[in-house]
Every structure is written in structure tokens, then in C-alpha cells.
Image (cartoon, helix red, strand yellow):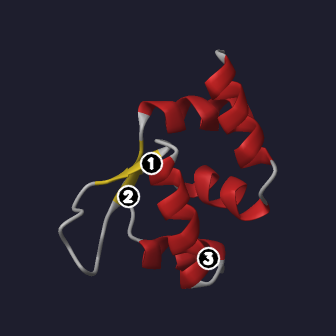
Amino acid sequence: MDKIEIEVVSWVLRGRQRKIILKILDKPKTPTQIKEETRLSLNNVSDVLRLFVKNKIAKCLNEEAKTGRIYELTSLGKNIKEKIN
């Protein structure tokens, strides 16, 4: 594991909501689906997903959509999920 990956794993582990969302992103999902599975607020889910995209943990598959955006883990996100589990 390189230094950047260690920092990202540490960042995810420090946030309860980040850990929860990372664990349930097993397939492409919308923020509403994540909200329903986690019982977190839609605002919190959207904030975490925005940070995941910024940190290259997840990617949005349909960025041009105003609603119903779909997110999935990147290879970095999948590696981090494996290390956390």
C-alpha cells in the first residue's frame, strides 16, 4: 500500500458515514438507494459521495444528469473496501 492509499484509508476510517457508505456500495447505486439502505440523510449521502469522487474512491457514471446520478466504486475504492473489511 502506498502513502496516498494509506492516507485515504485513514480518512475513510475516521468517518462513520464514510465507512457505512463504502461498505454498501457493492454495485452502482443512486444517492436515494444509499440513503434508504443506510438511513442517513440524503444531504449526508450526497456530501460523502462528492468527497468520494474528489478523492477518486467513487465515480459518477452519468454526471450530466441533474437527478438520479449513479455512483460506483473505482478500483481504488474497491481496494480500500477490501482493506477495511
Q: In the figure, 20 relative to 45: above or below? A: above
Query: In the visual, does 73 lie left or right of 7?
Result: left
> Circle 1 — which element?
strand
Query: In the visual, does 65 lie left or right of 83?
Result: left
Q: Which residue is mark 1?
A: 58
Distance from Cα at disc 2 to Cα at disc 3? 15 Å
Disc number placed over residue 36 in the picture, else none:
none
Q: How many residues crowd mark 1 within 10 Å: few (<14), some (14–19), many (20+)?
A: many
Q: Are marks 1 and 2 in contact (CB under 8 Å)?
A: yes
Q: Quadrant of residue 30?
A: bottom left
**Which badge, 1 or 2, comes first in the chain's sequence?**
1
Q: Residue at x 46, y 41 (%)?
A: 56
Residue 85 in sight:
no
Q: Position of residue 68 (x, y in %)?
A: 29, 76
Give the quadrant of the C terminus. Answer: top right
Q: In the figure, 84 relative to 24: above or below? A: above
Q: In the figure, 54 relative to 79: above or below? A: below
Query: In the visual, does 21 lie left or right of 76?
Result: right
Q: Quadrant of residue 44?
A: bottom right
Disc number placed over residue 71 in the picture, else none:
2
**Which badge, 2 or 3, comes first in the chain's sequence?**
3
Q: Residue at x 64, y 15 (%)?
A: 2
Q: Residue at x 45, y 79 (%)?
A: 32
Distance from Cα at disc 1 to Cα at disc 2? 6 Å
Which of the two residues, 38 or 69, is positioned nearer the viewer here?
A: 69
Residue 22 in sight:
yes
Q: Which residue is mark 3?
A: 44
> Circle 3 — which element?
helix
Amino acid type, callout 3: Asn
